[in-house]
Image (tube, rainbow, N blue to C red):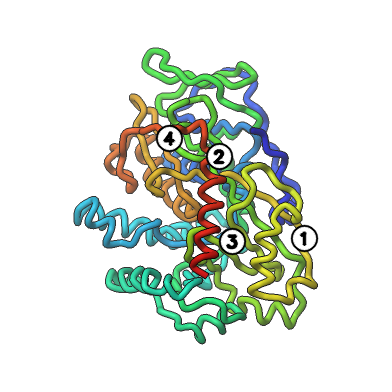
């Protein structure tokens, strides 16, 4: 399934982009990276800084996929609470993953500062909001679990939360003061520029159609017939994985996440809707997330059609939800709409695999990838440079498992979303 060029506010706002030419001739590199998103570009930057030659091959252009299309929220951590990882992985391994994942926004901020990337990063915190009274116990349990691990999370009762969001529909929630937001496309393009300036060879319009072992190295062939020989390869296409490694595509579900951006809010409304400029994501079976950007536009997203969208009319259910929370939005209107594919795994956790001697894949951020993907660039670069082992990566390596009945995923996603919305109505 092909997506058209996305119509996000990030595209509308960005300056003329640097063009990265297609690979047209044979190349030799220490490291080849398939995918020009946040994971691949961060790994490339760190690897060239470690003295390795790196070639990045992107099917379209850097930031074309979910890395440049997402909601721009910086959510520390992973799907489950810290204690869950300690129970599943043991004290040492679990604590290492918790320490890394919940400090991912700190690591991202350090990389942005070091590379001097202008991406409108703000650290006003992230709110987890309980939509229903029945959600309060689970949301509060997460806050208490994080607090017990020394994390800066504050519980917000209903009146306190209402002051931060501009309505009283939520029952309560917590604020993680480490979170924030940014322009994800500017971040991705900034990483590409930094990696390129440091010496990485970045090629757009270079889809890899063949990957095979050739003697002691890997041979990658693009759709134009150009080749790269590399000792180590990282495949990081996330929700845009194609048939290059069939089992990889079948181990994730590429779910569309859809987003609306309002016209700029007038002064009085901009002061009332999320005045502290935190980013927020709701509890519930169908998650909605939102923030107000630096141009005073409400950016709100969630599950939408399992196909590309470019018109606000295609996301009426999201606009109606926004107008329920802030009725004045009915008079403001929507500037644009877009979507992109995120990789959802069967356990809602990132997956890291060693697929062969020097061949690795990482995917499945499940909507929490902006900070984590960039933070993982450094340990991935150490692995690709031969300075560490797969077990040194914060995400524990696992064997790849295909999702049963994978070919029916579009119907399955539609059915799951419909059932979840029906359950939400009964809960309400």
Judged from this view, the residue extending furthest toward the front is: 426
Which label was assigned to residue 275? none
Q: In whole angstroms, how far apart are the C-alphas of marks 3 and 1?
A: 19 Å
Q: Quadrant of residue 397?
A: top left
**Earlier sequence position, callout 4 versus callout 3:** 3
Foreground residue, 41 or 141? 141
Name which residue lies at 42% across and 58% down: 104
Q: In whole angstroms, how far apart are the C-alphas of marks 2 and 1?
A: 30 Å
Counting other residues with Cα less than 10 Å from the Cα at mark 2, is it few (<14), some (14-19), or many (20 or more)? few
Judged from this view, the residue extending furthest toward the top is: 215
Of marks 4 and 2, the one in the foreground: 2
Judged from this view, the residue extending furthest toward the left is: 91
Name which residue lies at 45% across and 83% down: 157
Q: Looking at the picture, how far across and down is residue 15, in whole percent? A: 74, 52
Whether pointer 1 and pointer 4 mark residues with C-beta atoms closer than 8 Å, the reply is no
Q: Quadrant of residue 296?
A: bottom right
Q: According to the image, label 3 marks what residue?
A: 182
Q: In whole angstroms, how far apart are the C-alphas of marks 4 and 2?
A: 17 Å
The secondary element bearing badge 3 is classed as loop
Q: In whole angstroms, how far apart are the C-alphas of marks 1 and 4?
A: 36 Å
**Earlier sequence position, callout 3 versus callout 2:** 3
Counting other residues with Cα less than 10 Å from the Cα at mark 1, is it few (<14), some (14-19), or many (20 or more)? some
């Amino acid at each position: 399934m092909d997506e058209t060029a996305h119509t996000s506010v990030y595209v509308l706002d960005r300056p003329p982009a640097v063009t990265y030419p297609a690979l047209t001739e044979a190349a030799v590199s220490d490291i080849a990276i398939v995918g020009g998103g946040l994971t691949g570009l961060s790994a490339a930057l760190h690897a060239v800084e470690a003295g390795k030659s790196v070639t990045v091959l992107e099917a379209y252009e850097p930031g074309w996929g979910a890395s440049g299309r997402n909601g721009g929220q910086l959510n520390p951590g992973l799907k489950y609470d810290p204690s869950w990882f300690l129970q599943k992985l043991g004290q040492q391994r679990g604590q290492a993953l918790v320490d890394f994942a919940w400090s991912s926004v700190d690591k991202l901020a350090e990389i942005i500062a070091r590379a001097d990337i202008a991406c409108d990063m703000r650290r006003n915190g992230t709110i987890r909001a309980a939509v229903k009274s029945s959600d309060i116990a689970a949301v509060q349990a997460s806050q208490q679990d994080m607090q017990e691990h020394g994390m800066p999370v504050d519980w917000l009762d209903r009146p306190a939360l209402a002051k931060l969001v501009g309505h009283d529909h939520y029952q309560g929630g917590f604020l993680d003061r480490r979170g924030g937001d940014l322009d994800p496309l500017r971040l991705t393009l900034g990483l590409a520029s930094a990696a390129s300036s440091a010496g990485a060879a970045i090629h757009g319009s270079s889809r890899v159609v063949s990957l095979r072992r050739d003697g002691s190295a890997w041979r990658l062939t693009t759709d134009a017939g150009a080749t790269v020989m590399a000792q180590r390869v990282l495949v990081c296409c996330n929700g845009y994985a194609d048939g290059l490694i069939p089992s990889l595509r079948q181990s994730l579900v590429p779910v569309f996440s859809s987003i609306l951006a309002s016209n700029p809010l007038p002064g009085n409304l901009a002061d009332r809707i999320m005045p502290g400029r935190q980013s927020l994501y709701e509890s519930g079976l169908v998650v909605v997330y939102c923030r107000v950007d630096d141009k005073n536009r409400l950016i709100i997203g969630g599950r939408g059609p399992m196909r590309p969208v470019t018109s606000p009319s295609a996301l009426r259910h999201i606009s109606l939800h926004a107008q329920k929370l802030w009725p004045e939005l009915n008079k403001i209107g929507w500037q644009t709409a877009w979507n992109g594919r995120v990789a959802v795994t069967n356990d809602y956790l990132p997956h890291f695999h060693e697929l062969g001697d020097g061949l690795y894949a990482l995917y499945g951020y499940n909507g929490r990838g902006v900070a984590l993907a960039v933070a993982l660039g450094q340990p991935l670069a150490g692995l690709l440079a031969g300075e560490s082992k797969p077990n040194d990566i914060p995400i524990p390596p696992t064997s790849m498992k295909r999702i049963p009945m994978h070919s029916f995923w579009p119907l399955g996603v539609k059915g799951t979303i419909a059932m979840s919305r029906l359950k939400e109505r009964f809960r309400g």
